[in-house]
Image (cartoon, grey):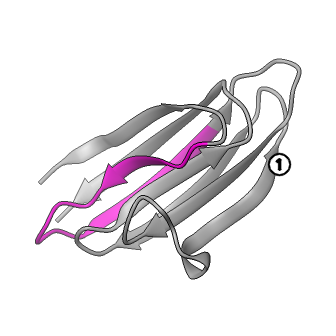
Amino acid sequence: MATGTLGQADLAATTNTTVYTVPVSKIGTVSINICNRSATNPVMVRLAVAASGTPANAEWVEYDAIIAPNSVLERTGIVMSASKNVVAYSSAANVSVNVYGYEA
């Protein structure tokens, strides 16, 4: 059973990035932290819990949410079934994503 940091990514601009995938035969309970490291520019971010690295419309949890400079967006208590993916997207670089939690 994995616990703690389950996935991390430094997002490239305008690219869907799979940050974490729940292993087969496991369930993941996660918190997701998206950090805008820019001191001057806001960013638009998207977050999905998806069956693949290309989320369907219904799989987005956040869509074009604005994160102010040096700020964070956090979602907690997300329960994911086996093989589901945390997928993140940002309108610009300088954005970090961390997935914390546990698998059972």
**In the picture shown, does residue 61 fall above or below 73?**
below
Q: Residue at x 48, y 55 (%)?
A: 87
Residue 91 location (% of width, % of height): 74, 41
Q: Nearer the viewer, residue 14 or 31?
A: 14
Residue 94 location (% of width, % of height): 66, 24
Q: Is residue 27 magenta?
A: yes
For the residue marked with disc 1, what is the amino acid? Ile
Sort mark 1 into few (<14), some (14-19) or many (20+) by Cα contacts within 10 Å: some
Q: Residue at x 25, y 68 (%)?
A: 83
Taking the image as shown, residue 29 lies to the left or right of residue 27, namely right
Disc 1 element: strand
Taking the image as shown, residue 8 lies to the left or right of residue 13, namely left
Taking the image as shown, residue 22 lies to the left or right of residue 13, namely left
Residue 51 location (% of width, % of height): 37, 72
Q: Quadrant of the C terminus?
A: bottom left
Q: Which residues are magenta?
A: 15-34
In the displayed orientation, state which residue is furthest to the top: 39
- Dot 1 corresponds to which residue? 66
**The image quarter in which residue 86 lies:** bottom left
**The image quarter in which residue 8 lies:** top left
Residue 89 location (% of width, % of height): 61, 47
Main SS of residues in magenta: strand
Q: Is residue 26 magenta?
A: yes
